[in-house]
Image (cartoon, rainbow, N blue to C red):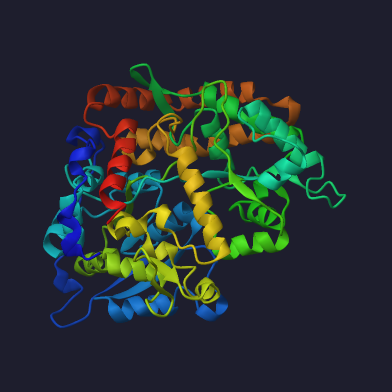
Amino acid sequence: MKAKRWNKACVTSTAAVLGAGMLVAGCSGSSVPDDKAGQQEGKRGSLTVSIYDRNNIPPEEGNWDKNRWSDWINKNGPVQVKYVPVPRWESFQKFNALFASAAAPDLILEYDTGYRNQWYAQKLLMPLDEVIDKYSTTYKELMKQFPQLKKLATKDDGKMYEIGRISPLTAGHRVYIREDWLQKLNLQAPKTTEEFFNVARQFAEQDPDGNGKKDTFGLNLSGNAPAIIQHMFGFGEVQWRFENDKFVHEWDRLAAAVAFQKKLFDAGLVDKDFLTDKNGEKAKQDFLSGRLGMYLFQDFPSEKDYDTFKKNNPNGKLAILPLPKSEFGQFSPAVGSPIQMVGVLNVAAKDPKSVMQYIDFMIKPENALTIQYGLEGTHWSKDENGCPQPIDAEKNKKEVAYTADLGMMASRLLYGKCGFDSYRPQKTEAQKELRELALQANAAYVSRERPIPTLKPEYLPVLPQELAIIVKNSDQQLKDIWIKAVVGGSGYTAEQAYKDAKELWEKAGGTRVDDFYAKWYAENKPKAFMLEDLYKFGEDAEKLYSNK
């Protein structure tokens, strides 16, 4: 889909947008540097860009200094780019170290809203209004079609600081369950948290793989698992939720989720060494090798991983499990944000024109499709729906499978129907199964009847710096308290952790943060992007784009 066709449909009238009063922190940015500093007339500009390092580039493909896709971008793009690898699960520490040594990349791509907000509060980011207005074409056009991008990028000083993307509303985190194990043990898919625990126990104790050994786990507790279990008990991605007509700090639901994790841990239904599995890689390998009855993760790792799973478990059958109902109700795990901010510019970037040219190039649908699927005629051809269909799945596993993070800024909605899970490729058995699991996940989790428990982080206001410091200074201590409750044995309970965490929060000044959010909600709820707007935007976007 070419950029000139984008205005044929517009979602702006169908979803509420954020009011200017929503974002309330303090910062003032510098003006746009003279582009002559980085680009003399006739000279090709350059920039540095962060890229998540997941150690997933095959050795024969190279590394982030040089591989076929960095070469393709530098050959076909308007500027020269150098990628700065950042460990995916330790990105905040790495970025802070780069900022401290004046080596942070010009364009920083980071999913975590909290991290980006901290850099904004520390005056490390460049305002983008003038940069976009002066140098952009493609992103500027995208903002006209989706003004929500500007609203979400705008901070309290009235300036924009973030680059965003538009996507269909889809499931984010998921619970995969071994349906073949359920059948073998004559079990039903669990519908309540009590049933969930009992199924996990059977998976761990009743030798579902039939090898005569007690070497299986009910589920994983590393990676995305704690967040998914918290959603099961109605605790979402932020610590505040709606209660009647107020926005309050949530403690009880988190305590219940931690108590449930402790129950699983104490019963030996999970890997006792899950804390050493920092990035969830061991849990993934346990799942692929056939040791997990339920895998709490996100979208399936890859087609290659699915093939590995089937090779190790020829009779393995997977299904998506809707989150079981807890005493607080039934919810869904995190969904992908249809309007998501993902990029910021380093205030020290000397050549913002090149940065904007790079952004425009990377988000054009034809370029974004190439980066995601490879070269037409080499890696894919059009299927009956006109969508990319891999030509050689094995070739693509090596040559294309590592490109996802290069496409962080791509707006999948602009692919038209090809951006929706319904039109995923179905040429191989793996593709058919992964498409079916994706559709199951969307049906189970993108649901008004089983909503996510609270707002997504990117739709909250930026805290003033003195309050952001309170959150930053207490964050790890609070996590340590809750983790201690999970692994600390009978001597330290979730109830005690609740008391200790609340006391720590209040002593740190956390009630000031609670009051700030309560006041923001009371004053801005008619204008803010609420859950109703999230679901309506997703529904309307699908109506307008899924058949294009």
- Whether residue 462 sits left or right of residue 323 in the image: it is left
Height in image: 145 above or below 415? above
Residue at 57 percent of width and 25 percent of height: 326
Total of numbered circles in the picture? 0
Name the foreground residue: 484 vs 294: 294
- Whether residue 8 sits left or right of residue 343 in the image: it is left
- Whether residue 426 sits left or right of residue 14 in the image: it is right
Quadrant where the N terminus sits is bottom left
Query: Is any part of residue 32 visible from this angle?
Result: no
Identity of the residue furthest to the right in this view: 212
Quadrant where the C terminus sits is bottom left
**Residue 451, picture quadrant:** top left
Looking at the picture, how far across and down is residue 104, in whole percent?
36, 62
Name the foreground residue: 405 vs 42: 405
- Whether residue 13 sits left or right of residue 366 in the image: it is left
Query: Is any part of residue 82 visible from this angle?
Result: yes
Residue at 12 percent of width and 58 percent of height: 133
Looking at the picture, how far across and down is residue 159, in whole percent?
18, 46
Looking at the picture, how far across and down is residue 431, in whole percent?
52, 61
Name the foreground residue: 148 vs 396: 396
Looking at the picture, how far across and down is residue 192, in whole percent?
61, 27
